[in-house]
Amino acid sequence: MKKIANFRIVFFLIGILIFVAVFLCSNFSLAKTISTPSTKIKVESLDFCDNGLFKIRLPILMYHHIGSNPNPENTPAEGLYTPINIFENQLALIKEANINSITVREAGEIMLAKQDLSGKSIVLTFDDGYDDFYTNAYPLLKKYQLKGVLYVITDFVGQPGYITASQAKEMAESGVVEIASHTLNHPDMKQLNSKDALKQLVESKANLEKIIGQKVYDFAFPYGFFRHNELQLVRKAGYLTSASTLPGLLQYSNNRFYLFRERPGRREGQEFSHWLSVLEGEKATTTVKLK
């Protein structure tokens, strides 16, 4: 009788443990540190009970203008410009370091398939679709045989200062540049209701696909702003990935819709080489708290 009573107690305790585990898996997320040398942000979107969380070390670099600022007195805009000579130096050093450049689409597919990267890899991204990407960055990417991802604001295509539809199509067909969406007109997505936010996502994707004659897979948030709701809408709109402006080097299978990116700025020469070796070598830590 005593043995039976003990077994009942054991089974009762096991039942409680199972109940607690299921409850935690259903209701909580695990705050995890994902890391960058510069910043620590709290990421609370990783599932508490993650069955097969997959991560890759993949620096994604973020650029805007490639060229000189025509109005240097406009200090806020100055940080968006990378001079051509510095940009070329950065590409040359990436090539010299035998780092493989891939697109965001390729990164997303690797994460979905839970495959390892073959050697050191990097993604070069360019926001907004400025015309200096076509005149300055695109020729250099071809010269150094590196790939780039251009996030295009679709309503701005053909406007002064932005790429034309024919340029977008040419680059998409080159195999050098992935054309991706950056909304219709660059709003702060956090300020939109769900209906308007979904319109930005769906219509920009459809418009770009008409322009380039290919499927558009990827998206970047204007200003890097998003909430949980926008992440769900990106998935609903049929994108493979979306990029944030949050710093980080480790890309997780469940942060596919807010990929981390790093800003190379105007580093060049030895400074850029050292920074690059840190990105590709040392462990990084970041954490992101989503509201």
Image (cartoon, helix red, strand yellow):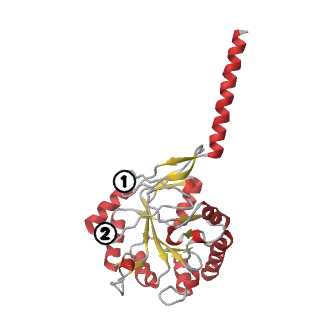
Q: Please tell me how crowded label 2 is: few (under 14), some (14-19), or many (20+) other residues with Cα within 10 Å.
A: some
As drawn, is 195 to the left or to the right of 267?
right
Contact, CB < 8 Å: mark 2 with mark 1? no
Horizontal side of residue 266 vs 223, given as left or right: left
Q: Residue at x 64, y 46 (%)?
A: 27
User: Can the viewer see residue 243?
Assistant: yes
Residue at the top extreme, as displayed: 1
**Residue 120 picture location, percent across and down:** 41, 57
Amino acid at pointer 1: Gly
> Nearer the observer, disc 2 or disc 1?
2
Disc 2 residue type? Arg
Q: Where in the figure is residue 279, as x and y percent of width and height?
A: 37, 58
Query: Which of the two residues, 7 or 134, is positioned nearer the viewer here?
Result: 7
- Label 1 sits on residue: 281
Q: Is residue 232 above or below residue 2?
A: below
**Which residue does the numbered mark 2 point to in the structure image?**
267
